[in-house]
Image: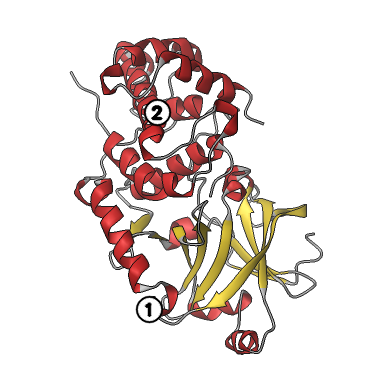
Amino acid sequence: MADGLKFIVKPRGVQDNLSDAKVDSYNPVQRLLCGPSLDPKLLKGVLRMYISPIMQRDERIGHSFDVEKAEVHYLLFYAADYCRLKAIKDDPAKTKSKNVVPPLTRVTEAEVFKRFSSRMEVGVLTPALAVQTFSVRRNPY
Amino acid sequence: MIVNQNSAVMFLLHIARLLTPDDDGVVNATIDMDYPRLIKLNSSASGDFLLARDENNDAVLCVPNSMLPWFVQVNWCRVAVWPEEGLLILEAAMPDSDSTGLAYGIKCRPARLDIILTEREAQMQDNGESRVMHILAMDSSKEGDPMFADAYAYTNVPLRMVHSMDEFVSTLSMEDAHEMFSRSGLGSVHYRAPRLGG
């Protein structure tokens, strides 16, 4: 295909916006754990404004991702981010810089879920659904 | 629409990170206040993409490998070229209608937008000749020496040229977008990463 391109403008760009090159995984929770922190309110707003409207019903986990159900993802992100920050806080010696990525082994999905369980007051996510969501994510493609 | 929930998650993180200041305090994308469904990337973030034409003279948008496969899991239904604003806007449709759910604006010099669609080609479209754009994966890890995939990741997105916001989106859609924007809470969010306590 490269030979077929007639001409190209704009030299290649600046950065990988995800900046998570240390993670060789497609697991969104893992990637979030290793990426920069995001404001949960911003995530929720972006989810409602941009992502939910263009989501299609996901037959594999048996429910549609309308705005309410999409809260599941928001909460998972929040929980994952919480665990990531907690890991850094628990072991500041190994994470002198705020940008240092804590080892993935320190925060497992089980721990994410465990911590997340204490944040179920919103009541949208059931444990069964969360487990299902995780299991789908483990082998996304 | 996005056909895969993992892609939706990745796209969510991508947009959220674009809207969050980086280490230098630079915000890589802004929400258009006239039409809040439009996210406009700055020059830096837009630089991740390449514009090209293939041997059939079709427009090609080259997307970094790191943004695949989730970027092409979005159902890009139209592409608008807006020379006056220097924007190439990818539009994603809602699943149950043809309405735009998300408009992703890539900044480009107006003159360079000719790579995608010229004014003359746009006029020819009015006479029934359709123009399309394809999306191609590229590996840009070696600076100055990008490599390209052997096949397109996404094909035949219809192209159009617009010259104003009225041309780009209907008044009804704009009102709908504003209503959704106010409900989303984005207007009141201060885009800051949470800090470690204690």
The spot of residue B146 in percent (x, y) is 68, 55
Q: Quadrant of residue B159?
A: bottom right
Residue B44 pos. (x, y %): 45, 58
Residue type at numbered disc 2: Val
Chain where mark 2 sits: A
How packed is label 1: few (under 14 Cα within 10 Å), some, or many (20 or more)? few
Residue ID for mark 2:
A72
Output the chain of dot 1: B
Which residue occupies 80% across, 59% down? A1
Quarter where residue A60 is shown: top right
Q: Tell me the amino acid under the disc marked 1.
A: Asp
Of residues B67 and B181, the one drawn nearer to the viewer in this rendering: B181
- Within 10 Å of disc 2 (Cα), the crowding (few <14, some 14-19, many 20+) is many
Q: Which residue is at the front of the view, B27 or A49?
A: A49
Q: CA distance from mark 1 to mark 2?
A: 36 Å
- Name which residue lies at 34% across and 58% down: B30
Quarter the C terminus of chain B occupies: top left
Q: Is residue A92 above or below residue B87?
A: above
Residue drawn at x 46%, y 61% is B100
**Element at label 1:** helix
Question: Is A125 left or right of B72, judged from the image as shown?
Answer: left
Look at 60% across and 46% down and name the residue there.
Answer: B73
Asked if residue B117 can be seen in this view, the reply is yes
Residue B123 picture quarter: bottom right
Q: Is residue B187 above or below residue A130?
A: below
Q: Position of residue B150 (x, y in %)?
A: 80, 53
**Numbered circle sitting on residue B166:** 1
In front here: A122 or B33?
Answer: A122
